[in-house]
Image (spheres, rainbow, N blue to C red):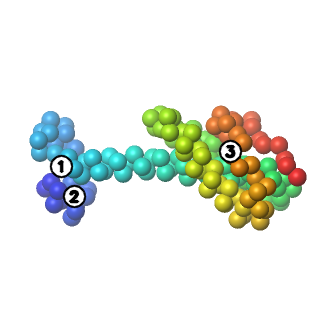
Amino acid sequence: MGAIAYETDFYGWTLEQAKLLQAGDFDQLDREHLVEELQIMNARERRELLSRLRVLMMHLLKWQHQPHYIGRRSWEKTIKTQRKEIAFHMEDNPGLKPELEKIIGRAYDLALDDAEGETGLPRKVFPAECPWTYGQMLDAEFWPEAVE
């Protein structure tokens, strides 16, 4: 199968590669595509964390800057869900910890765009840098104080 099957039968290719690894038949492995797939998996885990942090931060910003908004109950649910999902994701992927600061910075920049678009408030009303620590963001007892 090898590289040809990678292009035509990804599922079959993965089964073959797993069997080769289990058998210790390393010289038969499709190393080029295995490395590529591992890099894709790595990027997917980073994107998953970035996406969940982005949603969490956007909702924390909305929570903080629109304290009287009628739809806050749904924001609360989203915040609670994202907190749990992020904690689970980090538990499953502790190797992401060294990249956390960089990912938070990127996610916050995107969350600012989202919060501006969803609230109608200008971006300049929100803090330029993420105002919360990672620990605060995941703390079930933490709710940002209202800014009016």
Q: Which residue is mark 2?
A: 6
Crowding at mark 2 (Cα within 10 Å: few <14, some 14-19, many 20+): some
Residue 54 horizontal/vertical position (percent): 61, 52
- In this picture, residue 73 sits left or right of residue 109: right
Q: How far is the residue under mark 2 from the one under mark 1? A: 9 Å
User: Measuring 60% from the left and 46% from the top, which residue is drawn there?
Assistant: 105
Please say whether residue 72 is visible from this viewpoint: no
Q: Earlier in the sequence, mark 1 or mark 3?
A: 1
Q: Amino acid at mark 3?
A: Cys
User: Measuring 45% from the left and 35% from the top, which residue is drawn there?
Assistant: 95
Q: Nearer the viewer, residue 17 or 54?
A: 54
Q: How far is the residue under mark 1 from the one under mark 3? A: 43 Å
User: Measuring 72% from the left and 61% from the top, which residue is drawn there?
Assistant: 116
User: Measuring 63% from the left and 50% from the top, which residue is drawn there?
Assistant: 108
Mark 1 near mark 3, Cβ–Cβ under 8 Å? no
Q: Amino acid at mark 2?
A: Tyr
Q: Tell me the SS state at disc 1.
A: loop
Q: Amino acid at mark 1?
A: Asp
Q: Tell me the SS state at disc 2.
A: helix
Crowding at mark 1 (Cα within 10 Å: few <14, some 14-19, many 20+): some
- Is residue 111 placed above or below 144 in the rendered structure? below
Front: mark 1 or 3: 3
Crowding at mark 3 (Cα within 10 Å: few <14, some 14-19, many 20+): some
Residue 114 figure quarter = bottom right
Q: Quadrant of the N terminus?
A: bottom left
Q: Which residue is mark 3?
A: 130
Mark 2 near mark 1, Cβ–Cβ under 8 Å? yes
Q: Which residue is mark 1?
A: 30
Q: Tell me the SS state at disc 3.
A: loop
Residue 86 horizontal/vertical position (percent): 57, 42
